[in-house]
Amino acid sequence: MRIFTATLRKLARRPATLITFGVLAALLVFIMLAVATTGGDGAGDENFDPLALVTFPGAYEQILSFMLGLGGLFAVTYGAAIAGSEWTWGTLKVAIARGESRTLYVVGTYVGVVAVIAIGLLVTFIIGVAGAAAGATISGVPLDGVGDTDALAGLPEQFARGGVAIAAQAAVGYAVATLARSQLAGIGAGIALYFVGTFAGVFLPDVVQYLPFELGSTALGGGGFGDPQGGTGAVSPDTALLLLVAWLVGSVAVASLWTQRAEITG
């Protein structure tokens, strides 16, 4: 608990925290306002109305899907940035020198990272809803559905499923950066995994469906890179959730074991 609370205090002051979630929130609000000011002209097709992004109660699901989809990329880079900085800034060495358990330090820091990500995503969602409401007002879309009880009741489960996905994706970046002892290596690997999965899903859907970003999409009930329509893949949403937990536990375990055996110098 001491390591966890210390991590929270440390991350609250990190510029990476504000930049990561500030950019995500800004993108979300920008999209909402862009759709509202243009009225969705030229942005949709016969199967999708862009104004659905600012029409409640459906806007809740649209905001959550966008936030958790793109948020996975932000989470993996954020996890990598924090894990890598423990080595490059020497904070891990200092903690071990004062008698901290290496395993507890790695796990406690990771839990702190996940907590900050959860708080950041919750704040981002609230900002996104406010942006959608502003967009609805600008475009003349009624706000009658804002208080829809069925839509609001379904949000906690979606948040929980998305939270597991985000935590697993952050764990991958965290583990890679720990193994490489480098922020850049972890960030680069996370970004590569995200985009390689996007394109490789066209050719290797049976393989890509087990990668963390693909599993995150499936766990939320949507199609992934190899299954854009959703529901036709071999992995069910509940199975995807279990596999994400396996990715999470495995990644943190690898980071912990590596740190336990690593020679820390410098």
Image (spheres, helix red, strand yellow):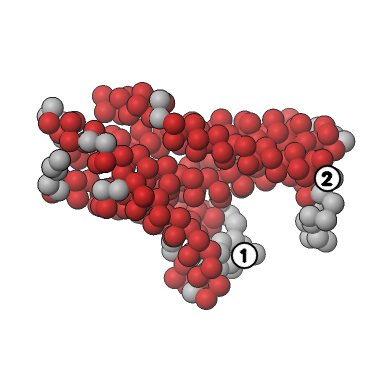
Above/below status of 210 relative to 260: below
In front: 101, or 22? 22
- The quadrant in which residue 131 appears is top right
* Whether residue 249 can be seen here: no
Left/right placement of residue 228 relative to residue 250 reads: right
In front: 152, or 30? 30
In front: 89, or 68? 89
Residue lying at 77% horizontally and 36% vertically, measured from the top left: 135
Q: Earlier in the sequence, mark 2 or mark 1?
A: 2
Residue lying at 26% horizontally and 28% vertically, measured from the top left: 3
- The quadrant in which residue 125 appears is top right
Task: Classify mark 1: residues with Cα within 10 Å, few (<14), some (14-19) or many (20+).
Answer: some
Q: Position of residue 159 (x, y in %)?
A: 54, 40
Q: Position of residue 22 (x, y in %)?
A: 55, 34
Q: Of the residues shown, which amino acid type is indicated by label 2?
A: Thr
In front: 198, or 188? 188
Residue lying at 84% horizontally and 45% vertically, measured from the top left: 39
* Whether residue 179 can be seen here: yes
Residue corresponding to mark 2: 38
Q: Position of residue 40 (x, y in %)?
A: 82, 49
Mark nearest the camera among 2 and 1 is 2
Left/right placement of residue 152 relative to residue 6 reads: right
Q: Secondary structure at mark 2?
A: helix
CA–CA distance between discs 2 and 1? 27 Å
CB under 8 Å between discs 2 and 1: no
Residue corresponding to mark 1: 228
Q: Of the residues shown, which amino acid type is indicated by label 1?
A: Pro
* Quadrant of the rendering where the C terminus is positioned: top left
Left/right placement of residue 128 relative to residue 22 reads: right
Left/right placement of residue 28 relative to residue 186 reads: right
